[in-house]
Image: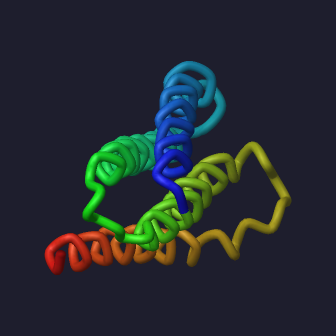
């Protein structure tokens, strides 16, 4: 995965986080209970953190000609963020979505979290061994 792609996805995560935060603060809070709104904001916050992290990593790796990490870490961070935040977003909308079968999403949240941890751990390991 190219540094520019990582930067683009990081930027997209930041944009989506801002939009989802505003959505949760203004519209969603009138439609679901406070626990669902809190969960929504957790998903939005984590998307922002991962987006900013990807931006920093992408920019940093572009400036390091000697650092060829192959960006395998970024793929896990991106997938983990999609699973983690995406599952929480959908679960937060459970009362609105009604009868949709959302049970499978429960396990996706911790799997997404583990993938984010894996991605950051790979980056740590590879960057310390250069």
In the image as oriented, which residue stretches furthest toward the top? 26
Pick the residue in front: 19 or 74.
Answer: 74
Q: Is residue 6 left or right of residue 108?
A: left
Pick the residue in front: 51 or 67.
Answer: 67
Q: Is residue 39 visible?
A: no
94 vs 77: above or below: above
Image quarter (top left, top right, bottom left or bottom right) of the N terminus: bottom right
Q: Residue 29 placed where, x, y %?
A: 55, 28
Q: Residue 116 placed where, x, y %?
A: 40, 68
Q: Residue 101 placed where, x, y %?
A: 80, 68
Q: Quadrant of residue 55?
A: top left
Name the residue: 55% across, 56% down.
88
In the image as oriented, which residue stretches furthest toward the right? 99
Q: Residue 40 placed where, x, y %?
A: 51, 43
In the image as oriented, which residue stretches furthest toward the left? 128
78 vs 30: above or below: below
Q: Quadrant of residue 91?
A: bottom right
Total number of numbered discs in the rendering? 0
- Colour convention: rainbow
Name the residue: 47% across, 35% down.
14
Q: Is residue 124 visible?
A: yes
Pick the residue in front: 96 or 54.
Answer: 54
Name the residue: 18% across, 75% down.
130
Q: Is residue 103 left or right of residue 63?
A: right
């Amino acid at each position: 995965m190219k540094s520019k792609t990582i930067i683009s996805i990081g930027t997209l995560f930041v944009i989506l986080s801002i939009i989802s935060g505003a959505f949760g603060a203004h519209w969603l809070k009138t439609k679901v209970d406070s626990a669902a709104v809190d969960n929504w904001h957790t998903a939005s916050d984590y998307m922002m953190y991962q987006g900013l992290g990807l931006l920093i990593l992408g920019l940093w790796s572009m400036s390091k000609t000697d650092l060829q990490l192959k960006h395998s870490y970024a793929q896990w961070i991106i997938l983990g963020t999609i699973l983690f935040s995406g599952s929480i977003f959908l679960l937060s909308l459970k009362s609105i979505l009604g009868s949709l079968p959302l049970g499978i999403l429960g396990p996706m949240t911790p799997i997404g979290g583990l993938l984010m941890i894996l991605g950051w751990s790979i980056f740590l390991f590879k960057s310390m061994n250069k």
